[in-house]
Image (spheres, grey):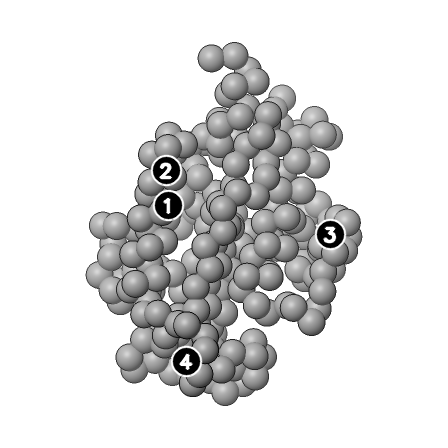
Amino acid sequence: MNNLSKLDLLPYRFRGFYPVVIDIETSGFNSKDNAILEICLITLKMDNGWLKKNKTLHFHVLPFKGSSISQDALAFNGINIYTSLRGAITEIEVFKIIFKKITKDLKKNKCKKAVIVAHNASFDHSFIMEAVKRNKMEKYNPFHSFVIFDTTSMCGLILGQTVLAKSCHKIGISFDSNQAHSALYDAHCTAELFCKLVNNWKTKGGWPP
């Protein structure tokens, strides 16, 4: 396998890990008590060594039974959990679809584990891991139990910014504040941001050596 073909495979860039960009909207800040209300995942691919967005999965999620709902959180993200127009499905249905897709992608790309990429990634990671426990899906979970790629930290180091909107503007990505706090919109912005950070690092001689 020549160098170019190696660069075109994700495992050679991320030590066998498969990065998946994720954004979630929730009914509060407590991963044990509050519910995931919306989730978007964007897979990535290598194109001649350049990282790009690939496929998108997006779901509206029904609050799990007994979950705590903060009205302040709903006002912030603009989600109306009481309307059937959301087309929301249960948490376990959502994660069955997600895990099946990511597990298939792991095999296809010869990666050993998926890693969550997110802005303030510890937040999204904690909610997903609690959902895994709650639904007894540990053996199906393709995501690493503690490794995350946090674009907040990356932006703080590289751009001198930590807010998603400001980081996007700084690196040349348009950001519409009116669409913010939608998992679908924020995930796409985060994916664009992560790809630009990784690709710009390459142009500056960071990787590959």
61 horizontally vs 183: left or right: left
Residue 50 appears at what percent x and percent y?
62, 32
The amino acid on which the numbered mark 2 sits, given as a three-letter code, is Leu
Instruction: Say which mark, if any, is on residue 102.
Output: 1
Q: Of label 4 and label 3, which has the lower sequence position?
A: 4
Residue at position x 36%, y 76% in the image: 63
Q: Of label 2 and label 4, which has the lower sequence position?
A: 4
The residue lying toward the viewer, choosing from 157 and 100, is 100
96 horizontally vs 125: left or right: left
Q: Disc 2 designates what residue?
A: 106
* Residues at marks 1 and 2, CA–CA distance in whole angstroms: 6 Å
Up-down relation of residue 105 to residue 127 (above or below): above
The amino acid on which the numbered mark 1 sits, given as a three-letter code, is Ile
Q: Disc 4 designates what residue?
A: 84
Name the quadrant containing residue 161: bottom right
Q: Disc 3 designates what residue?
A: 173
The amino acid on which the numbered mark 3 sits, given as a three-letter code, is Ile
Up-down relation of residue 159 to residue 34 (above or below): above
Q: Of label 1 and label 4, which has the lower sequence position?
A: 4
Instruction: Say which mark, if any, is on residue 80.
Output: none
* Residues at marks 2 and 3, CA–CA distance in whole angstroms: 29 Å
